[in-house]
Amino acid sequence: MSDPKSDASKYRLRRQSLPEALAGSLRERILNGEFKDGDPLVQETIAAEYECSRMPVREAFRQLEAEGLIVSRIHKGAVVTTLPDAEITELFELRAMLEPDLLQRALPNFTKQHASSSEAVLVELEAAYHRRDIGRVGALNWEFHKSLYVPAGRTQTLALIQSINIQTDRYIRLQLLLTGGFQDAERDHREILRLCVAGDDSVIDYLRAHIIKAGQDLVVALGRRRVEEPVGAA
């Protein structure tokens, strides 16, 4: 295991809003799989890596726990959450209920400007697919979906959907790596945008099927991985 102090420069943060910046950095490390399901996050170790006190680490941990990425356990400290298959399925079922409804509300207000914004994000996302840049794929996947829902003007629903996406993001990234599903994702997103631009109501069912299939493929891929690499294994 590497010496935390030797890696300090890699994780050094700018001083403004330190807990928020720290939470952002740790979030990305969880989403990218550097910290895996069940891994402990030790305050002292994290503080040493980032060259800060434990206070901002504690505040960052609170934010990550509110997002469902870590959980605090008595006598064990913070650990990266492990979502059972049933909970992953539930999250994708929630997405399949909420996101098509939001898109249906957005579609009548979907202008050329909205289409242009979504197209710009999609081009970046497709480039990330081709590079297999999984970090950018995770961030841009949400940005693309968000760009389609913004015209609905439903800020509370959008915030709720974003929180669900944060919880499932790391598993989606893993599923793409395990299954090589980049091409299918690229095709589906391109078709979703085409239907939105055309004002075609069939996009609602297409989006729902896209989300449900992603959830099903994810559970299958995770099932295989958990058999091959049990949580907590070295």
Image: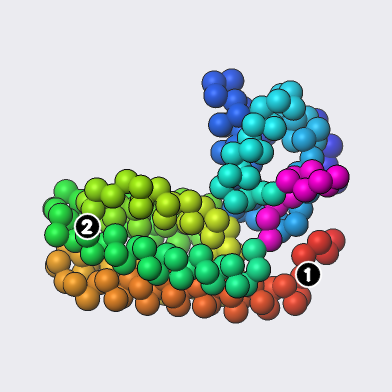
Q: Which of labels 1 and 2 is toward the front?
A: 2
Labelled disc at residue 118? none
Labelled disc at residue 106? 2
Q: Is residue 75 magenta?
A: yes
User: Furthest-front residue in view?
Assistant: 74
The amino acid beneath tag 2 is Ala
Q: How many residues crowd around disc 2 within 10 Å: few (fewer than 14), some, or many (20 or more)?
A: many
Q: Is residue 60 visible?
A: yes
The amino acid beneath tag 1 is Pro
Q: Do the residues bearing badges 1 and 2 touch, measured as CB atoms within 8 Å?
A: no
> What range is drawn magenta here?
72-82
Going 48% across and 51% down the picture, which residue do you hit?
A: 163
- Residue 104, position as x, y percentages in the image: 23, 64
Q: Is residue 68 above or below residue 191?
A: above
Which quadrant of the figure has residue 184? bottom left
Q: Is residue 54 left or right of residue 205?
A: right
- Residue 27, position as x, y percentages in the image: 60, 45
Q: Is residue 14 magenta?
A: no
Labelled disc at residue 230? 1
- Residue 54, position as x, y percentages in the image: 74, 27
Going 16% across and 48% down the picture, which residue do you hit?
A: 113
Q: How many residues crowd around disc 1 within 10 Å: few (fewer than 14), some, or many (20 or more)?
A: few
Q: Secondary structure at mark 2?
A: helix
- Numbered label tally: 2
Going 68% across and 78% down the picture, which residue do you hit?
A: 224
Q: Is residue 215 above or below residue 26?
A: below
Q: Is residue 215 left or right of residue 111?
A: right
| Quadrant into which the C terminus falls | bottom right
